[in-house]
Structure formats: C-alpha cells, structure tokens
Amino acid sequence: QVQLVESGGGLVQAGGSLTLSCTASGLTFDDYAMGWFRQGSGKEREGVSCINYSGSATFYANFVEGRFTNSRDNARNTLYLHMYGLKPEDTAMYYCAVSRGSACYGGSWPGALERQYTDWGQGTQVTVSS
C-alpha cells in the first residue's frame, strides 16, 4: 500500500521561504516520477511541479516563475519542494503524488495532469501573510 506523508508547511511572511517534504513508502520510489499540486480555498487543485524518476528533469507551472525547486533523494524515499519568494497567492494546501510512470508527461506542461497520478498524500498547509 502506497503511503505519502507531506510535512514542512506553515505560516510565513510574503517574501519568505519554506521547504516541503514528502516521504513515500510502499513503492519502489525511484521507479516513478513525482508531482506537487496545490489547492487554495475555493479553488481547483492545480499542478505545481513534476520531477522524473531520477531527478534529472523537472518541470514547473508558469506561476512558479523560478521561485520553487523540486528535488528528490531516492536513497531516503523523499521528495522536496523548496519555495522562495513566497507570495500571498501561494497560500494553499500542497500535495505530493506518485506518477503512473517514470517520466513527466501530459498537459500544458509535462506532469500537469492529475490523471497522470495514482496516489496522493494528505497535504500540508502553506499560508503566506502579506
């Protein structure tokens, strides 16, 4: 049974930084691409970033604008999202998810489509104050 546990969310002032973690179990972690998604209050869930199985390729939504870095440590079965220059509009619940395959694909950018992913964590809340 696949289990994903996110951590690292919290309250931060605009311009601040946070690093989210996602620890995976119940799967061969380095066989799969991984994604980050977010859902703000009253909004639809949207893709943030995808990283391929090895970490050699990463893709981001346009709104990231170079402020986030997606990385993974396959030895620790852990995915990270380093976020810098946070804005109030980044306030959301952030989720990690396991892809169906080893690569990021599909959607307006590789990894953007929710249907690419099979398992999801419970999320970690990020709140950015102005």
Image (tube, rainbow, N blue to C red):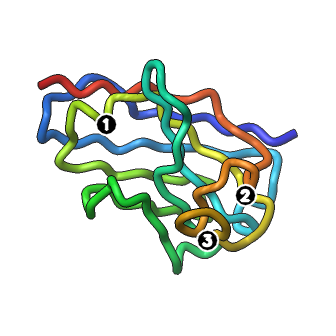
For disc 3, the neighbor class at 10 Å (few under 14, some 14 to 19, many from 20) is many
Mark 3 or mark 2: whose residue is earlier in sequence: 3
Q: Quadrant of residue 126?
A: top left
Q: CA distance from mark 1 to mark 3?
A: 24 Å
- Image coordinates of residue 94 in percent, x first then y, are 48, 35
Give the x, y percent position of residue 38.
Answer: 49, 37
Q: Nearer the viewer, residue 97 or 43?
A: 43
Residue bearing the label numbered 3: 52
Q: Measuring 74% from the left and 56% from the top, which residue is drawn there? A: 116
Between 29 and 41, the one nearer to me in the picture: 41
Q: Which image quadrant is residue 99 in?
A: bottom right
Q: Earlier in the sequence, mark 2 or mark 1?
A: 1
Using the image, determine if residue 7 lies above or below residue 63: above
Is 48 positioned to the left or the right of 82 in the image? right
Helix, strand or loop under label 3: loop
| Amino acid carrying mark 3 in the image | Asn
Mark 1–mark 3 CB contact (< 8 Å): no
Residue under the image location 27 percent in, 60 percent down? 65
Residue bearing mark 2? 99
User: Which residue does the image show at 55% across and 64% down from the upper left?
Assistant: 108
Q: Secondary structure at mark 2?
A: strand
Residue at point 54%, 73% (across, down)? 55
Badge number at residue 18: none
Instruction: Please name the residue that numbered disc 1 is placed on.
Output: 90
